[in-house]
Image (cartoon, rainbow, N blue to C red):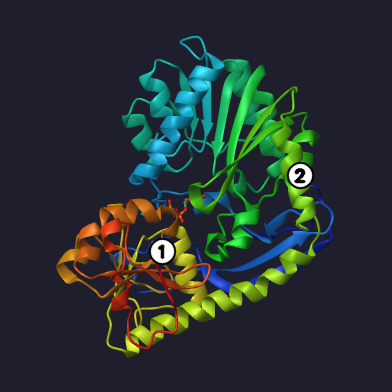
Amino acid sequence: MLEEISGCRSCGSADLETMLAFGDLPLADAFVGPEEMEGPDAVYPLTVAVCASCALVQVRETVSPETLFDESYRYYSSFSDALVEHSRANAQALITSRGLGPESLVVEIASNDGYMLQHFVERGVPVVGFEPAPGPASAAESLGIPTIRRFFGIEEGKRLARERQPADVIIANNVLAHVPDLNGFVAGIGAALGRDGVAVIEAPYVRDLMERREFDTIYHEHLCYFSVSALAPLFRRHGLSLNRVEHLSIHGGSLRLHAGHHEPVDESVGRFLHAEKESGLTETLPYLRFAADVEETQRVLVDLLRELKDGGMRIAGYGAAAKGTMLLNACGIGRDLIDYVVDRNTFKQGRFVPGVRIPIRDPELLLSDMPEYVLLLAWNFREEILAQQNEYVRRGGRFILPIPRASVITGADPRNEGMDATRPAGSSVGVEKR
Ligand code: JHZ
């Protein structure tokens, strides 16, 4: 169930240097049901290392995917409007640029609840999704999306090309980081992809993680944290050319990579490689220094929450995100500081955040209960959540942004500008004006 790697997940080098050790933590998406409250949560060590050879940042421990993505997996992509819209725009652009039609095949790996493939189906483009988690797979099937309930790898890639047809487009969003056998996965993409097809892959960018101190995006599900410099040799090893790289704001900053069996290589690839070399991301030193930043971010946040609590304030959380579980547990923020966490995902409501066991409730509770502060755990959907919680803010409620250094924000509505005069007395942390 838990294994430790002996070499780099990409190049195999045994030269791995430890950059962060979080100790034992629960699984970030293992939300606890009321019937499971008796015993303690299972915890697993979480240690992050960087490869001295290819600079890939990776978790040393592997919790088996069968444990992580079983029937208890409750992450449904469609609960975030911004993500569905992001995917619709991407699908639209691919249909146009690749001239996709009824003869084409679009494959998505980790197709979840159909948040992405539905946009191709609507336009009459045939699709196949790979999704092993039973809950999201069923949701996708109910939208009419053919779903293979298996993990993707080299064998699945070969079978798809042989028994169906080579894919015109392969989409793999936020899944590369989840794969223990990175080489087998990329080889599978190569096997399934048609001669002139394109693989479009999104993954959180390690550069943003470091610059914005997004330490809470590190958890057992995410085995790797990618730079373009670490990815280029991985793709090359399996006969794929990295042809274009885009920088997206989604999920706190992501890379979108376009790969194919042959070139041309766009200028963006060289630009990213150059910028990463310039900022030292091809060496281990910046990664090894990151621990001090994480420690400071955690300390500032806990100090702020304690100060507010000591001042008689009530604090809730917004977003039972996996990163929320990580943040609360890594910082030791429990029910003494946070009364409850709200989330729109009805499969998470009524359950408890793993480890810290904070109850998860419906977001409507914020208005009826009016806690003075809400810690924005799903900070990556800040705009969407603040717009939706306009009324809570209008009535005087305040959001706290946990990273890069805890700060109090006043809301998405420009009419709230200037309301920062109500900054809590004695707070040592500044109020960010929007
Ligand atoms: P969200 C996910 O991580 C899942 P998580 C996964 N581990 C991954 O790789 C990364 O993304 C990249 C809720 N919400 O998506 C929905 C509201 O309640 O940031 C979610 O439960 N109201 C595969 O879990 C949570 O917040 C809203 O208005 O850290 C957000 O979780 C919105 C917008 C969201 O990721």
Which residue is tagged 1? Answer: 377
Give the quadrant of residue 409.
bottom left
The amino acid marked with disc number 1 is Leu
Taking the view exactly as shown, the residue that stands out farthest to the top is: 103
Q: Is residue 274 above or below residue 107?
A: below
State the residue at coordinates (38%, 45%): 76
Q: State the image coordinates of residue 327 (x, y, percent, origin top left).
A: 48, 69
Q: State the image coordinates of residue 27 (x, y, percent, origin top left).
A: 50, 62
State the residue at coordinates (57%, 27%): 170
Which one is nearer the viewer's eye here, 278 or 307? 278
Q: Which mark is residue 228?
A: none
Q: Residues within 10 Å of mark 2 (few under 14, many from 20)?
A: some
Q: Which mark is residue 273?
A: 2
Q: Mark 2 or mark 1, which is nearer to you?
A: 2
Query: Element under label 2?
Result: helix
Q: Is residue 350 visible?
A: no
State the residue at coordinates (65%, 55%): 207
Q: State the image coordinates of residue 164 (x, y, percent, origin top left).
A: 56, 16
Left or right, 368 with respect to 361, comes to left
